[in-house]
Image (cartoon, helix red, strand yellow):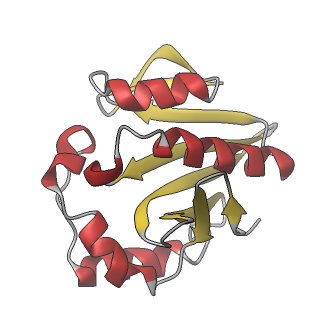
Amino acid sequence: MAAEPIESERLRLKPLTVWHAARMVGVLADPSIYRFMGGEPPTALTLSMRYRAQVVGHSADGCTGWLNWIITLTETAAPIGFVQATLIDRSQLAADLAWVISPHHQGRGHATEAAAAMVAWLRDHGVSRFAANIHPQHEASAAVARTLGLHATAAVVHGEVRWES
């Protein structure tokens, strides 16, 4: 499965390319993004190398698939974040989801809209189970997960609560 462009009411999800690295450095520059997920703002070189690995679309052993989209505003084409799905093929195709929105664009429903558009696209492509790992204090991401139909489980992965459909 390969990422395809996705459109929603206010957003366009564009399949990730290495070219996006230069534009995403500014989007991912605010240190507050990393409060819950850890890490620090990437450099252009770091982001370029990360994207070069991600656009391959799968792990080296082929057991895990990667789908990544850059979220842009339809009105301006400005990037505001990203969504991603890590595909795991067990008895049913399942996806671990993630979303990140620049703090300058948070609080406007963009994460929910983008994640819902991604989930709808994934469902149309045979994915039937969804999950996300969310920091227990990250209420905004928990709200997105609830809107997607996920519920918190008792499982904790690297300090984050596992949410599942």
Observer-nearest residue: 46 or 12? Answer: 12
- Residue 88's x, y, as percent? 67, 48
Q: Residue at x 75, y 44 (%)?
A: 120
3 to the left or right of 139 = right
Is residue 67 something that shows in the picture? no
Q: Residue at x 36, y 37 (%)?
A: 107
- Placement of 72 over or under 128, stated as above or below: below
Is residue 89 something that shows in the picture? yes
Q: Residue at x 65, y 51 (%)?
A: 9
162 to the left or right of 50 = right
- Looking at this view, name the residue that lies furthest to the front: 75
- Placement of 164 over or under 101, stated as above or below: above
- Placement of 49 over or under 96, stated as above or below: below
**Which corner quadrant holds the C terminus?**
top right
Observer-nearest residue: 119 or 129? Answer: 119
Q: Residue at x 48, y 39 (%)?
A: 109
Image quadrant assignment for residue 66: bottom right
141 to the left or right of 1 = left
**Which corner quadrant holds the N terminus?**
bottom right
- Residue 92's x, y, as percent? 81, 38
- Placement of 113 over or under 75, stated as above or below: above
Numbered circles on residues, count: 0
- Residue 100's x, y, as percent? 39, 50
- Looking at this view, name the residue that lies furthest to the top: 154
- Residue 150's x, y, as percent? 59, 23
